Structures are given as structure tokens and as C-alpha cells.
Image (tube, helix red, strand yellow):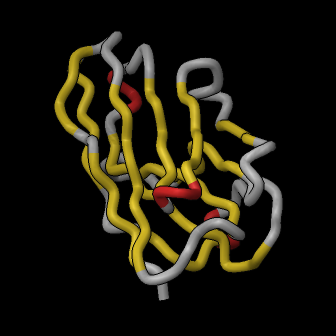
Amino acid sequence: QVQLVESGGGLVQAGDSLRLSCAASGRTLTNYALGWFRQAPGKEREFVAAISWRGRSTSYAASVKGRFTISRDNAKNTVYLQMNSLKHEDTAVYYCAADGSLYRGTQDSQYEYRDWGQGTQVTVSS
């Protein structure tokens, strides 16, 4: 079983940037699609971004498209989420996740993911 650990969250001002990292241990992520989700207080967890197992395809929620970029470094067994032009409404706990199946493209449903990190808080002050 893989363990996923997110880092890079924090308190920033609107318009600032943050880069979240998610490092895996226990299993290689090389052959799995990866995703980022977030959950704001009182709201359901929602899809943010995903990257295919090869890293050739990415997908984004409409609310973050053009501002966030997902990437992966298989040599480091790590997935990243670069967040630019942050808005107050981006405030949430951000989770990374690994697909439950091998060799797939991007997945935007949380039910397709098997392994989850513990989350990292991102707070954007307006």
C-alpha cells in the first residue's frame, strides 16, 4: 500500500502562488494516474486536477483552469500542484490521490482513486 504525504500548504494573500507537493512511499506511482482534490469547510470534496499515468494528459476543474498546473516527477515519486493567482475561494484542504487502476488517463471522479494523502491546508486571505 502506498503512503501519500502532501506538503506546501500555508496562508497566503489573494494573488499569491503556492506549490503543493505529494510524495509517495511504499509503492511507485509511475504507472498510476494521479489527482488533486480539495474540500472547503461545509462543502463536499471536489476535483481540482489530474494527470495521466504517462503524464501526457492533464485535466482541470473549470474553476482552476489557467491558474493551476499539475505535474509529476516519476524519478522522485512525487506529484505537484502549482497554484497561481490564488483566490479566497481556493481556501480548502488539498488532497492528493493515486488511481486504483494501472495505466489510465486522467480521472476526475474521487471514486476512481484508491490511495489518499492526509491533506494540506491552503488558506487565501482576501
Left or right of 107 in this view: 23: left
Q: Nearer the viewer, residue 13 or 99?
A: 99
- Relative image position of residue 108 (x, y in whole percent): 70, 54
- Relative image position of residue 77 (x, y in whole percent): 50, 62
Quarter of the C terminus within the rendering: top left
Q: Nearer the viewer, residue 57 or 94?
A: 57
What's the residue at 69%, 62% (across, down)?
33
Left or right of 113 in this view: 37: left
Q: Nearer the viewer, residue 82 or 63?
A: 82
- Relative image position of residue 120 (x, y in whole percent): 28, 52
How many labels, in total? 0
Identity of the residue furthest to the bottom in this view: 1
Q: Say if 29 sits above or below 87 in the image.
A: below
- Relative image position of residue 62 (x, y in whole percent): 67, 29
Q: Say if 95 sits above or below 32 in the image.
A: above
Identity of the residue furthest to the top in this view: 15
Query: What is the quadrant of residue 63 in the picture?
Result: top right
Q: Say if 125 sits above or below 4 in the image.
A: above
Q: Say if 79 sits above or below 109 in the image.
A: above
What's the residue at 58%, 39% (across, down)?
70
Identity of the residue furthest to the left in this view: 11
Left or right of 56 in this view: 49: left
What's the residue at 81%, 69% (across, down)?
103
